[in-house]
């Protein structure tokens, strides 16, 4: 009889007090899987995270061992996010940005949410490692969030990563009301002429190298993130490594995404995840995205006060690095106000500059806070 | 009873990081912008027509 009962240890252990929290975690995992499949919200990450969340939350789950191995091999040492950046770099076409480099300034402005959230999070979290890591949710950039939170040694890496990816998926819901609230109808109707300049192949090849050098000089902590991102872009633009570029964009990015998603769930045990602080992190993440959007739009309005040729202030909102959603949202909103208003090339230019600026912001946070460790 | 940390004055204490951080982002992005303009200018000036896309 004892032997028979021992077969069902897991079931008996489940009857213990406190295990209701595990059911809550299954529900959270289920919701993430639902959002991924039914609503197609960042499915490549939310689905593995959701599934990982379920298998991590069983009494004595055998999944914890392999996931811990993966976590130590790929997230604790920041390897997965960095390799993923090679794929992302290979996907990005910096052409619209190189055609009009002044758009970069809007990418910088849209990082305001990161630093505002840093101040907000410091109200609720006493440890600088936590509030600086929570702030980076505003980078709207999963790999940067993981790298910063890990380097600072925050205890909330799981919640921060889930918040970053969830809100990236929710950008189409979060941004439009903020943009509308901060702009008039006439401002949203401002047309911007796209005058594509001839960008030589040499410029496209030199750009990733120059960005890496500048980043390594001025923000050495961004060296790895920017370096891997730009390495991917150099593979794309050099013109002699097409098969490597294709592999980086598809096979490499997909492979790492599978491991990254399910490994993040290692930190999503009921004990670590179900507390008031997780709810606070979710709330602060939302604030970060809203303030990022507002910062970009308001900077666009400020620019118009001094500029001879007015820009559509909505493109400032594309400066958050959720690529390419933020760029597309601005374009769609422009078309909604005026069917002849094509903002896509401008908004994508701002969007890719936001990708660079968010990494720089992450590096600056590391530069400020790592010496305090 | 929920018992969590709440120190509103920390916001003001950390405003300096907001200033340093945003200033840093603008300076570095400004340098990248300048380098990009310079690269575009030099390569367009030096490039032969066949080098252009």
Image (cartoon, coloured by chain):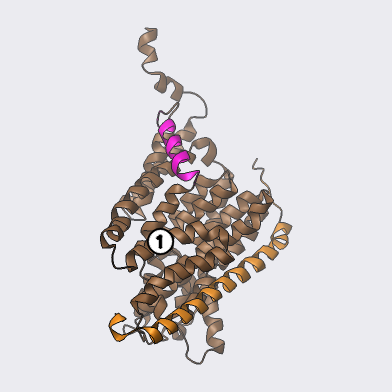
Chain colours: A brown, B orange
- Residue A302 found in image quarter: bottom right
Residue at image location 39% in from the left, 84% down from the top: B46
Q: Between A150 and A112, which is closer to the camera in this rendering?
A: A150
Instruction: Give the magenta part as a residue range.
Output: A62-77
Magenta includes A352?
no
Could you say where residue A328 lies in the image, as x and y percent from the top left? 36, 71
The secondary structure making up most of the magenta span is: helix
Q: Residue furthest left?
A: A243
| Residue A330 visible (yes or no) | no
Residue at image location 67% in from the left, 63% down from the top: B17
Q: Between A20 and A224, which is closer to the camera in this rendering?
A: A224
Magenta includes A67?
yes
Q: Residue furthest bottom?
A: A308
Answer with left or right where residue A373 lies relative to residue A95.
Answer: right
**How packed is label 1: few (under 14 Cα within 10 Å), some, or many (20 or more)?**
many
- Tell me the SS state at disc 1: helix
Residue at image location 55% in from the left, 50% down from the top: A149
Against A254, residue A330 (above or below) is: below
Could you say where residue A114 lies in the image, as x and y percent from the top left? 57, 62
Q: Quadrant of the N terminus of chain A?
A: top left
| Residue A156 visible (yes or no) | yes
Could you say where residue A223 lies in the image, as x and y percent from the top left? 52, 59
Against A255, residue B27 (above or below) is: below
How many numbered discs, if any?
1
Q: Residue furthest top?
A: A1
Could you say where residue A26 lies in the image, as x and y percent from the top left? 41, 38
Q: Which chain hosts label 1?
A: A
Residue at image location 36% in from the left, 48% down from the top: A256
Q: Between A248 and A347, which is closer to the camera in this rendering?
A: A248
Q: Between B16 and A2, which is closer to the camera in this rendering?
A: B16
Residue carrying label 1:
A231
């Amino acid at each position: 009889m004892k032997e028979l009962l021992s077969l069902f240890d897991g079931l008996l252990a489940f009857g213990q007090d406190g295990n209701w929290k595990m059911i809550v975690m299954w529900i959270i995992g289920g919701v993430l899987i639902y959002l991924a499949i039914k609503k197609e919200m960042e499915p490549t990450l939310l689905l593995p995270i959701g599934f990982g969340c379920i298998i991590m939350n069983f009494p004595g789950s055998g999944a914890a061992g392999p996931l811990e191995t993966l976590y130590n091999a790929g997230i604790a040492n920041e390897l997965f996010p960095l390799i993923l950046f090679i794929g992302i770099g290979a996907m990005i076409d910096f052409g619209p940005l190189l055609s009009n480099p002044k758009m970069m300034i809007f990418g910088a402005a849209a990082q305001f949410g990161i630093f505002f959230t840093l101040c907000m999070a410091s109200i609720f979290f006493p440890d600088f490692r936590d509030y600086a890591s929570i702030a980076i949710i505003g980078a709207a950039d999963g790999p940067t969030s993981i790298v910063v939170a890990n380097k600072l040694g925050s205890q909330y890496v799981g919640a921060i990563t889930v918040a970053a990816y969830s809100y990236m998926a929710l950008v189409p819901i979060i941004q439009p009301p903020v943009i509308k609230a901060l702009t008039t109808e006439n401002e949203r109707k401002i047309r911007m002429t796209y005058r594509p300049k001839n960008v030589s192949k040499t410029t496209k090849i030199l750009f990733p190298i120059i960005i890496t050098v500048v980043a390594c000089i001025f923000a050495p902590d961004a060296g790895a993130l920017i370096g891997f991102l730009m390495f991917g872009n150099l593979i794309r633009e050099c013109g002699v490594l097409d098969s490597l570029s294709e592999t980086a964009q598809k096979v490499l990015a997909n492979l790492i995404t599978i491991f990254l998603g399910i490994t993040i769930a290692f930190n999503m045990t009921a004990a670590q995840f179900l507390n008031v602080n997780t709810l606070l992190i979710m709330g602060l993440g939302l604030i970060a995205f809203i303030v990022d959007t507002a910062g970009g739009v308001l900077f666009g309005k400020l620019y118009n006060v001094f500029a001879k040729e007015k820009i559509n202030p909505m493109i400032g909102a594309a400066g958050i690095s959720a690529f390419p959603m933020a760029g597309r949202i601005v374009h769609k909103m422009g078309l909604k106000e005026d069917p002849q208003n094509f903002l896509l090339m401008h908004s994508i230019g701002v969007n890719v500059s936001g990708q660079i600026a968010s990494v720089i912001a992450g590096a600056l946070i590391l530069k400020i806070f790592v010496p305090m460790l | 009873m929920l018992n969590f940390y709440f120190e509103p004055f920390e916001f003001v204490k950390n405003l300096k990081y907001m200033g340093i951080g945003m200033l840093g982002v603008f300076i570095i992005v400004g340098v990248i912008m300048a380098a990009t303009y310079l690269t575009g200018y030099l390569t367009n000036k030096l490039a032969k027509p066949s080098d252009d896309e």
